[in-house]
Structure formats: structure tokens, C-alpha cells
Image (cartoon, rainbow, N blue to C red):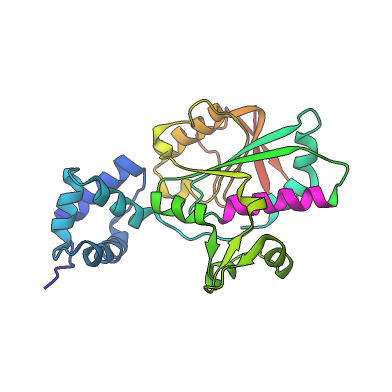
Amino acid sequence: MQRKDVTDQHYSAFTAYLQTNAGIVLGEGKRYLVKSRLTSLLFETGMDDINDLIDKVLSGRDRQLTQMAIDALTTNETLWFRDNYPFDLLKSTLFASMTQKKSSLTMWSAACSSGQEPYSIAMTYKEYLQSHPSKSFRLSIVATDLSSKMIARCKLGEYDELSLSRGGLTPERRKRFFTETGEGTLKVVDDLSRLIQFKQHNLLDGRMPGQTFDMIFCRNVLIYFSPEVKAKLLQLFAASLSPGGILFLGASESITGASEYFNMVRCSPGLYYQLK
């Protein structure tokens, strides 16, 4: 018989472990989330007691189980063209202004989850080139996530109807940028996927080695972190941007604690942050 109730001691120890190793802050009100996500691991691992599972994760002896537990608590589904305005700004002003003196741009989609954000950026780039035939520049996108499971899903590039229905994926985009697999899913075309390099990366480990970026998307991620970790990550992004580089955060996020690095640029609609 499975035991699925998490003791106070195990909950405190596990959430402290998550905060240290993934930066994720889970208060007492998230106990139900920990229970539901870890219960699924009981079935996968064949274990009977959720507290024994937590003990095994905390021991660090089973790296695969540890990664599975972190994946279970940090995996979030995202949307195609979330909030629209960042992608509209790319097409209306930013692609043009940022390539006046450059023939290529590099972008980082940080904490890319299941891949909708970097693929949306790639679609926006292709649409821009189609509507501006006289413009020509190269775009390379690095997309990272803590979860190895999510990165594998991103690389596969296959999405079911539920995933495809969430966000701003128009019928025209579905027709142009996806092909049917014959198994009830659509697969991103190679013309998009070759623009993106997917990598597993923990933001708490610091900047991407040897890389600087013209633009960083880290949207609806900072809300999960403590103020101290948020400040650390904003400093990381500042150090990872090239001069004049641009940072997009989520609609409810701000640069509190790192305003010395960025200027806020208000648009209509939306805003972004530019490296000072």
C-alpha cells in the first residue's frame, strides 16, 4: 500500500533542497503540488512511500531519481506567442534596429520549458524575412531549461492538439511551420528547428560558457524565485548581453534589484529592458 502523505519534516527538507538546487521557492501552500507531482514518481519508480522517495532524492545517491524529482516540480507548460507584444515588437522595430550594423543576431530563450517560446521567436523571424525581402540577417537561438525531459521534448518538436491550441498559433502558422506525423501530433519543420540549439542548463550555474547574446527572453520565470535569486539572475543576464542588448521579462515581472544594469523601454503595448 502506497503512502502518499508528506510529513512536515520531509516537506521542509525537500522544499529547502529545491530552493538550493533549482532556486524554486515553494511555501506551505504548495504542499498539494509536491504531493501530486511526487506521487506520479511513486508509480514510475515502483516505490511505496513518498517520504522514502524524498529521502532517496535528498541522499543524492540516485542522480536519475533526483533529476526526475526536480523535473516533476519545475516543469510548466507554456504558450505560443505568449502575450504577443514581444513578437510584435521584434517584427515592427527590434529586428530592423538591431541589424542596422549587424548581419546576425543571437538570442537566448532561458527556461524555455516545452519549447513554444523559442519556436515562436523562430517563426517571427521567418515571417519578418518574408515581409521584408530586402532585409537579410542570420538568427541563432540558444534555448535552455533545467529539465532534461523538457529539452528532449523540445528537440523532438512534436506537439498534440491541446498544446497547439494554447496561445497565438494561427491556422496559417500551423500550415506553414508544422507537418503532420500521422500519430495525432504536428512536428515543427526543419526550417525552424535548425535555427535553435537546445541545451540543458541550470540558471543558478551562471552564464552560458563563452556566449553573449543580443537579446534574452526569460519570461514568467523570475516569479518562482526568491528576491535574492532574482537579483542574481538579473545580474547574470546583464553579464550575458552584448552592449545595448535587450531583455524581455514576463508581463508581471520587473528588474527590481538590478535597475543599475538596465533602462526600461516602454512601448505600446508592452515594454522591455535595455542594457545600459
Residue sitting at 13 percent across and 57 percent down?
52
On the image, the x and y values in percent for residue 22 come to: 35, 44
On the image, the x and y values in percent for residue 35 come to: 26, 64
Question: Compared with residue 44, is residue 243 higher up or lower down, i.e. above or below?
Answer: above
Residue sitting at 54 percent across and 70 percent down?
185
* The one of 12 and 139 positioned closer to us in this rendering: 139
> Which quadrant does the N terminus fall into?
bottom left
> In screen coordinates, is 244 left or right of 257?
right
> In screen coordinates, is 204 left or right of 11?
right
Task: State the count of labels.
Answer: 0
Question: Compared with residue 178, is residue 245 higher up or lower down, i.e. above or below?
Answer: above
> In screen coordinates, is 108 left or right of 113?
right
On the image, the x and y values in percent for residue 139 come to: 68, 40
| Residue 125 in magenta stretch | yes
On the image, the x and y values in percent for residue 15 come to: 26, 50
Residue sitting at 58 percent across and 29 percent down?
212
Residue 191 in sight in this render: yes
Q: What residue range appears in magenta?
A: 116-130
| Residue 71 in magenta stretch | no
* The one of 184 and 33 positioned closer to us in this rendering: 184
> Which quadrant does the C terminus fall into?
top right
Residue sitting at 84 percent across and 52 percent down?
131
